[in-house]
Image: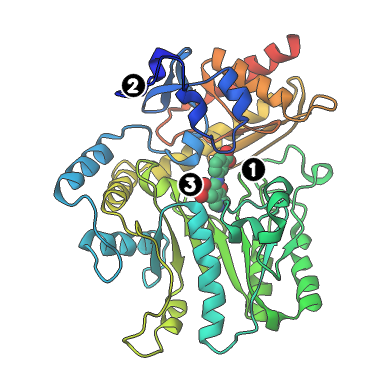
Amino acid sequence: MNPNLAVAGVSEPSGAIDPLQSWWMPFTHNRRFKSKPRLIESAAGAYYTLTDKGRVFDCLSGMWCTPLGHSHPGIVRAVTDQVQRLDYSPGFQLGHKPAFELAARIAALAGRPRDRVFFVNSGSEAVDTALKIAIGYHRVRGDATRTRVIGRERGYHGVGLGGISVGGIGVNRKMFASMMMPGVDHLPHTYSPKNMRFSRGLPQWGAHLADDLERLVALHDASTIAAVIVEPVQGSTGLIVPPRGYLERLREICSKHGMLLIFDEVITGFGRLGKPFASQFFGVQPDLTTFAKAITNGVVPMGGVVARADIYDAFMNGPEHVIEFFHGYTYSGHPLAVAAGHASIDAMVDERLIERAADLAGVLEDAVHTLRDEPHVVDIRNIGLAAAVELEPSAGQPGVRGHRAFERGLDEGILLRLMGDIIGLAPPFISSEEEVRAMIESVRRTLRAIAAD
Ligand code: PXG
């Protein structure tokens, strides 16, 4: 047994159980990881410290969660104070004031102060909650045949049963085909290398792909469709940036046919595009918005759904003694998450970090596109403070080149997030311009090194 991993107080004979084996890790090649573990010791600001590699720059802000940097003092203080005052508070039939205030602040930040916020604990729960709100909304208005939801190919909406049904990633779905929500259909994804390789920001080509929604309406009839769910920018499948005009067109078609538009803003929410929400960046207002991750800077799990005020109102028509929406989680509005949420918004506002993300976006765009002629690079795309560098897969071995880049990146002082052979970059908002440029130079050295190996 690795002594560093020993579970304190467990009196197993030495070597009987290696705790490394005990955790069945999420979205991980468990055997590969356990044969060569990568362990994180600590984090501060824009850096992690790994057990055997030292300090590395956090190129994806902790899976998009930690734009304000690790151990932000304001958040640490807020959570520490809160745990001493009120550590847990039931959220059914009771509430604590800061949770209501956080809901109001989030709606205000979204530029829609009358909207309502339903709290959950993760992006997956936010998506399943939004789907229930959408279907429930039509039902309470007497439009109960509207039960279908339209998702999109290459969409990632978490791993709940609703989320994988509307999601468009084959490997996340095939094992669970029998558990899928019925009646779901998918729009085509918008990625077309031929028409948009090396675009800076929004690709010019592809708005017409939104018209496929009219085809699905003709096929299923609008009277059977409750909602359309998309990520404004598809994150997990390699930062697929929407074509100019595409989201506007989806909005038009949804409004025309009485279908709700859901934006899954789990990664774009709270500043990644240089505006609080992607809906503000694009000037396209959805009816429901999911969020998670950066609301608490990743410190305590939290997610939620922002719902248009009249959607909430539609649920409020029944008798007052009846619960209007039979849905919720033990930890909805958890006091520690709420405290972290307030402190994160305080930091974003006081330190002007969303504006800073907007400023850094141009630095990242200019720097990342200089990688165009580096070995194996087949595309580069960017939006806001996020970018992707797509590598040509090794013949017959998808993902292998990406993994080599990950490993080599650690030697270059960067913790990369690889989505197969696509390098995702979304540095913390607190990064300096020099750190963003240095990150790209480290990626360059990494690409050259793996090409020379
Ligand atoms: N919706 C979207 C758009 C997401 O990106 C989820 C829902 C699910 O959130 P939870 O909290 O249930 O995991 C996500 C999660 C990556 C990466 O590397 C992205 C996610 C998770 C982990 C890694 O891009 N997105």
Q: Earlier in the sequence, mark 1 or mark 2?
A: 2
Crowd rating for badge 3 (residues with CA inside 10 Å; few <14, some 14–19, many 20+): many
Q: Is residue 258 visible from the viewing direction of this image?
A: yes
Work out which quarter of the rendered image holds the C terminus and state it: top right
* Pointer 1 with pointer 2, Cβ within 8 A: no
Tell me the amino acid under the disc marked 2. Answer: Ser
Tell me the amino acid under the disc marked 3. Answer: Gly
Label disc, if present, on residue 277 of the rendered structure: none
Decide which of 378, 147 is in the foreground and name it: 147
Crowd rating for badge 2 (residues with CA inside 10 Å; few <14, some 14–19, many 20+): few
Position above or below: 100 against 68: below
Mark 1 vs mark 3, CA separation in Å: 16 Å
Tell me the amino acid under the disc marked 1. Answer: Leu
Quadrant in the rendering for residue 27? top right
- Residue name at image x 28 percent, y 51 percent: 342
Q: Which mark is nearer the camera, 1 or 2?
A: 2
In terms of secondary structure, where does tag 1 sit? loop
Estimate the x, y position of residue 22 in percent, counting from the top left: 49, 30
- Residue name at image x 67 percent, y 80 percent: 257
Decide which of 72, 383 is in the foreground and name it: 72
| Residue at which label 3 appears | 274
What coloring was used for the rendering?
rainbow
Q: Which mark is nearer the camera, 3 or 2?
A: 2
Estimate the x, y position of residue 211 in percent, counting from the top left: 77, 67
| Residue at which label 2 appears | 11
| Residue at which label 1 appears | 239
Q: Is residue 285 visible from the viewing direction of this image?
A: no
Quadrant in the rendering for residue 259? bottom right
